[in-house]
Amino acid sequence: MAAVCAQESGGSFRPVAYFSKVMPLPVQGMPACLRALAASAMAVELSQSVTIGHNTILHTSHQVTHLLKNITTQHMTSQRLSGYEVILLGTANLQIKYAINTQGPAAILHALLHLSDPTNAFILDPHDCVESIHYSTSPRLDLTDTPLSHATNVFVDGSCSRPSDDTYKAAYSVVQLPDIVLETKSIPVNSAQAAELIALTRACHLFANRPVNIFSDSRYAFGVVHDFGKIWQQRGYVTTDGKSIAHPALIDNLLQAIQLPSEIAIIHCRAHTNRTDEISLGNALADQVAKTTASSATPTVIPMFLHTPTSCPDSQILQYLQTFATQTDLHFWEQQNLTLDQFGLYSIQGKVGIPENSLPLLISQAHGIGHRSSKLTLAEMQKHFIAKNLRQHCSTFVKTCLTCLRANTLGTHKVHQNLPPPIAPFSHWQVDFTHIPKIGKLQEYLLVFTDHFSRWVEAFPCRHEDAKTVVKFLVNDIIPRFGCPQQINSDNGPAFVSKVLQLLISTLQITWKFHIPYHPQSAGVVERMNRTIKDKLTKATSATWTNWKSFLPAVLAEIRMTPHSVTKLSPFEIVMGRPFPTPWVKGPLVIQHTDLNLIQEEYVRNLITTLNGIYGDVSLSFPLPPQEPTHPFRPGDPVVVRQLHRYRKGGFPFGPRVTVIAITRTAVLTDASDHWIHASRVKLAPTLPTPELSKADNTEHDTTTKSVTEGPEDDVSGPHTPTTDDDEEVHKTCTMVHNWHFPFSIFPDYDNP
């Protein structure tokens, strides 16, 4: 749904706001006029924040008022319809105008959405919305739910019972009063709904080229004919979310059979009423005949597949396998005291010798459908067989089982977590937003900058988590006070990937690195500082967070004067070269009767010496990145990647097998994704396909279509392409005009759900 809110000025409409919203899935599957009704209600609701109760005119090409007052449809729930009535009929100062052509800003909006020429007016054919809904939802125009006076009355019913868990008895009947059975037959289905559809279809075939009234007690079959069947047919028999509907073939046959009678009325009647009127008696007769036919029919058996436990092959198969034994196998059997038994098999105490080259076949059976571990698989094999290098073969088989590899959570490679340390303060910053607990309805944030070298922290309260806020504090605070840094690291949040922020750092020649997605350890410095600040504010405010901003300067000062666990020095001491001055810790007051310039020169010389010593101590306190490779992956290796939302979506913890096409120190790039993946989420997959390889995993990945430009440096990714939909209000969604006394006009566009 898309709409434009405009004001009349100078004889034309000037746009004030643009609204766009995705319609709910049930609404997307409705006929066009009902979608227009929903879009109109959504547009009016969205515009209320702009109009603020002023006179508003809704321009629409659909008779939404007539629909609300006259429609009786099953496509929309009464709750949803009541909500639309409240918005469109109960909103004060709202006027609805009907127009068949699109004018003003709506014409431009429609042209943009449909890629057409905005100079050409978009004119709709006049139509009656009620008739249009009936035309789009009815399989034939003369279909009615009111009995025809000159047509034959026919009663249909379908029955399905379940005598046992795997058997069904189903049948249908087509009857006339007083006791005429036109057709009844048992059918191999396991659903009463399917039986009702077949009964209705057969009645249409029996009365081809004749008028007929068909009575059915199935609300499902009645709804398929009058409400949903035609829409399902136009949509390809799938639901609004793309899933296949039940009984698509039967519904298609029914929609075709409805065209056969010369005139037809399909009427829904109540079942099991015990009344003596004609409709109740006819429905009872159809129900009785269908149940009688179903009870005497041959039951339909639903096949059930059961995996049988692993069993030892028979002696003939084992004899055949032993014919492939090599001299090495025979020598090993001789060492294990195997002899020929009565069946001609090399065995001892019921355990049969197996050639080493035949082990994978039997190990696959012992591994089982439950995919036992290598230890249990070995134990199962040792119960029945003796073979050379049996333990090694079991271990190798389980390690190369792709199903086990994807299902087992263990086995990922632990990479080194150390980043290359900076060499001076304020050259490398980490930045992040942290949420402050809500006080009332207001959500506030804290923008935290942490220096990677000294652990110096700057925190700024803000009300918006956007790029405008980041740019504001960078330009007004960080850069004027500490200079332009060499590098800033952050996550991939919308506030940091914005075009306006990337333009700023490009102008200032600052390198901005993004952390690898879903790996918060990359931002460990600022994330730990977020926790420290929030813990101290919680204690300072007694967990009420009242007036937390007044405590923030003291909390930051306490952090700056406290020695850090890594550097063993306070951030203030690293930056200033002396402890934080307090009433209890003060430097010596030196007063000398000499030239002031000499005193300043000596102080600066001592300060430089002190700072150089501190920088050296701090640099030595950081763990250095290892020189050896941090992960075993190389381009071309088959790997599986840990899925991040498997508990919500189901499936294996690890995804299907993919191929590595590029690597960095801590990350890999695969042919299945354009994003770099931290190596801790990846583990090697077997090179050759195994019997457990699923169909989805056999898909060949095209590794020649992806180009690799720049990988992540350490735990941060390379340059990020900025998005255009989250700029610092460069493109505002509404431009307020000053003449508030003019009425507003809303132009919705209905063709875009």
Image: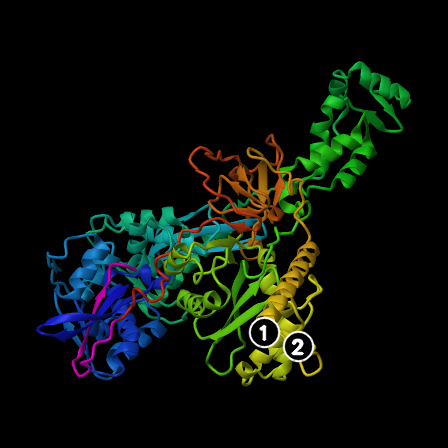
- Hey, what amino acid is under mark 2? Gln
Residue drawn at point x = 52 percent, y = 34 percent: 698
Residue drawn at point x = 65 percent, y = 80 percent: 539
Q: Residue furthest top?
A: 327
Q: Quadrant of residue 158?
A: bottom left
Q: Tag on residue 311?
A: none
Is 627 in front, or is 166? 627
Identify the image quadrant of the C terminus. Answer: bottom left
Q: Residue furthest left?
A: 11
2 w.r.t. 166: above or below? below
Residue drawn at point x = 67 percent, y = 47 percent: 414
Query: Residue 742 lies in magenta, yes or no?
Result: yes
401 w.r.t. 6: above or below? above
Q: Tag on residue 592?
A: 2
Q: Position of residue 638 (x, y in %)?
A: 58, 36
> Would you call the spot at circle 2 few (<14 residues within 10 Å), some (14-19), or many (20 or more)?
few
- Hey, what amino acid is under mark 1? Leu
90 w.r.t. 661: above or below? below
Tag 1 residue: 596
